[in-house]
Amino acid sequence: MRGLLLLLYLAASASALCIGNYYIYALGDAVYVFEKHTLRLVNSFQLEGGVNAALAIGCVVIGDSLYLGVATGYSYIVVKAGPLGVERRLEIDGLVALTNHCGRVAVLVDNMSHIAIKWFTPNLEFVEDVWWSKADAYYMLVSSGCELWLIEYNWPPWRVDIYYIGVGGSRTLMHTAGEHGEVVPDGDGGVYYITPTKWLRISKYGVVNIGRGVRDLIHKAFIKGDAIYAVALQSPHGPNYVTVARSWGEVERIYLGSRHVELAADGGYIYIYYGGSRLERRPYLPNGTAVVRAASDIKLGNVKTGIIGVGEVGGPVYGPFKVLAGRYVGYVAHCGGVKSVEFEVGDGEAKEVVIEVRGHHVRIVLVDFFRRPLDGHLYVGIYGSVATCFRDIAKSPLDVVLPEGEYKAGVSFFRDVERGGYRTEEYITTWYSFRVEPGGRIALRDMSLDRLFAVEGNTLYIYRDGVTYLELLPAAALFGVFYALDKFSSAASRRLGRR
């Protein structure tokens, strides 16, 4: 369990956008190299052993050299790369984190009994190290300017100790927190510690509470201007979003949709990486508002409305919500299925999407042998792929309004039977699957073997007696033909015999 949590934390802490002086490295299925000024893709290369670059530990750029921690089997390797590809590699056992400490590569190592910080030159030549006994905790290493910080996440009770690393590797405890949080460099030698309830600025001179916290499970965070951009832990089961917060001020949430995007800030700009060769630079996060409404001429019942990758609600209206500018899919999930519409939200646009769900009349009629409608009571349950559409005791004929979609229905009723000179009631249940097509016609998908029903147009006829005269007429006509042929054959045989 502890190993799993550490793995998740390390994966969540790794950035996939590494910004240098002249080049930007984007980590995905490969390392993509962009020219910083033009954002033009100039190269891409694979890490050794087919390792997914997005799973690398750390994201350090010194000048225009990229440094990544890579796990290969049971070994950990620090890789140095440039715009043309991998230049150097160094195996380091127990690698946990790495960072840029004032132009040197600082590496955090955990050998299960001790932890150490090791410093290397930009060419990965060893400089010095410092060791401490390891607590029952896991660790992170963060640099801010030319200052270095060690964060100790203790196991239960959850306690976080934040240490300032001074000259010669001296360790000074600056703050102890009682709740888990994210550490973000402030770029001026200190760090921000952001929890669900507090936003602290910690420096070697002390601790200051500067704002409210962010109540999200943070994937990563960065500072731009006076705001912190906290990216939620992205999941294929959604929703993905960025919380933009200002100290003691407004907090807004911008949803990213089903796309997995990476964000980073540098020089007053936000860089947005969509994967592959698509990288954008904006002075702010481009966004608009979106709302999805279900319009229908029927009572939809358990309808759900939403936007894929953003969320959904039980009801006919979802939104408005702020979303990253781009393409989305809105949907209405009614009892019989899902109807979706693709739409685009531009920067600064307020988009309203209306999805029409038309209803069609479906009649269920109980009939006798002569196909005469009966007024008997039916227990009817109609179930769609999403929810129950209708379930009640109703009198025949029953008129139900259903949207287009696929359904399974069960119809139960009593009928009189005679057995051994006694009349009694028999409880009959028949199941059938059908689809309501755009014009309202019923199309059967499968049926029970006893075939106690028939379909014509939008009407389902339930046979109380198991059969009607319409099914017997073809059989009677066929019997008459066979009888006539038999008589004709007998007469012909007698004539031939007299000859």
Image: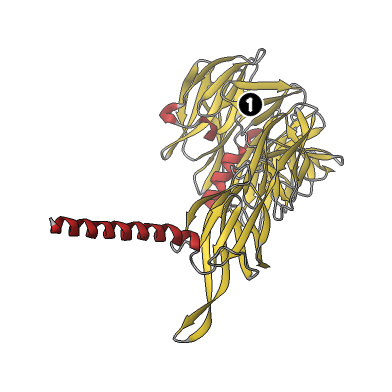
The answer to whether residue 353 of the structure is visible from this angle is yes
Vertical placement of 313 versus 45: above or below? Answer: below
Q: How many marks?
A: 1
Name the outermost residue toward the right.
249
Q: Position of residue 180 (x, y in %)?
A: 69, 50
Vertical placement of 265 versus 182: above or below? Answer: above
Residue beneath label 1, please?
A: 273
Q: How is the image coloured?
A: secondary structure
Q: Quadrant of residue 380?
A: bottom right
Front residue of this view, candidates 447 and 177: 447
Q: Residue at x 64, y 28 (%)?
A: 101
Q: Position of residue 363 (x, y in %)?
A: 64, 56
Q: Position of residue 382 (x, y in %)?
A: 61, 59
Q: Would residue 178 be found to the left or right of residue 33 on screen?
A: right
- The secondary element bearing badge 1 is classed as strand
Front residue of this view, candidates 280 and 439: 439
**The disc labelled 1 sits on which kind of residue?**
Tyr
Vertical placement of 145 versus 165: above or below? Answer: above
Q: Residue at x 57, y 45 (%)?
A: 8
Q: Residue at x 23, y 60 (%)?
A: 490
Q: Quadrant of residue 132?
A: top right
Front residue of this view, candidates 250 and 64: 250
- The quadrant the C terminus occupies is bottom left
The answer to whether residue 448 of the structure is visible from this angle is no
Front residue of this view, candidates 30 and 404: 404
Name the outermost residue toward the front.
499
Q: Quadrant of residue 282?
A: top right
Q: Position of residue 116 (x, y in %)?
A: 55, 40
Mark 1: give few (<14), some (14-19) or many (20+) Cα within 10 Å: many
